[in-house]
Image: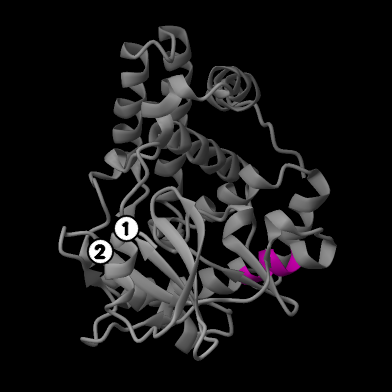
Amino acid sequence: MNAILNEALNNYEVQCPKVEFIRHNENETYKVKDELTNAQYVVRIHKPSEKFSLDVFGDEKHSVSLLESEMKLINSIRENTDILVQQPIKNKEGSFVTVLNDGTPVTLLSWIEGSTVQESKINEEVLFTIGKMVGKFHRFSKKYSKDSNLDRYSYDKSLLVNTILKIKTGVELNILSSEQLKVVVDAANEIANRMNELELIENSKGIVHSDLAKSNLILHEGQVAPIDFCLCGNSYYYMDLGSLFSHFDNLEQRKSILSGYKSIIDEEIDTKYIEAFMVFQIILFIATHINNGENLEWFSAAIERWSKEFFIPLANNISFIEL
């Protein structure tokens, strides 16, 4: 066990920890089992990987205020919905966020047993359950967002501008061509146009998860549990649908997800807005990985594919999602 992880765990009532590394993106994440009590946890050391940049959010690391608000949100979901989520664990001082000697914040949450959607064979029932869970979360958010005053990221036009500025550095680094950058900028401009349209629709925005990747969805006894709310924030609810559609590209899968969603949120869903936020997800991914683009063999080819399949059609108001 490395020194920083040892220091982190010493702040909690974990007596005999057995540690397993999970991943390192925006956080350094480990599974921890207390072999004395058999309790299982997730510990997150909030120090982004060198391959992952939080610059577009105006952050080098997650602030204590952001993490406290994340814990508050998760607890509110636990108290006010039947959505299965992790339980935030307080440290020995009674706080949900621990700050290490070097200033690095740490959080501990309960472990949810199960497998990720990424690791599992999924069927129509699972997909419907995913959509239903997101619908329940948005139904909760529509009430909660009006009264809460959380310190969260905002997935809005300002972030869109920051994202483009970050991607522009890819031209200086010879990772992107000027032509590729123009395609991304044109797509971003159309995203901004569609955000303006959504501003005219009542209750179109609130707290969203924003990162509904297959690895952040846990299957547990017939339920789908969302994990890793670290990047959650204020945006249009279509942000989460765009997130799902960027990870589930099969037509029938998308239909099943939307069926589950609409079983809770009985509203018309316009695919033009799903397309906008699906592209927003992709360009956010580019921006957070652009510093390491030259070391990613697939990066250049992926830019070309995304441009052809998504960016250019969006900029030209050509639909690329069929339902």
Does residue 44 lie above or below 160 as drawn?
A: below
Instruction: Between residue 187 and residue 114, name the one nearer to us.
Output: 114
* Residue marked by disc 1: 46
**Quarter of the C terminus within the rendering:** top right
Residue 48 percent across, percent down from the top left: 34, 48
User: Was residue 129 drawn as part of the magenta stretch in this picture?
Assistant: yes
In-image side of 213 versus 260 (left or right):
left
Residue 139 percent across, percent down from the top left: 53, 73
Amino acid on which disc 1 is placed: His
> Whole-Å distance between the Cαs marked 1 and 2?
6 Å
* Residue marked by disc 2: 105
Query: In terms of sequence position, does the residue under pointer 1 or pointer 2 come before the other?
Result: 1
Residue at coordinates 84% horizontally, 61% vertically from top-left? Answer: 123
Amino acid on which disc 2 is placed: Pro
Residue at coordinates 39% horizontally, 40% vertically from top-left? Answer: 52
Range covered by the magenta-colored residues: 128-133
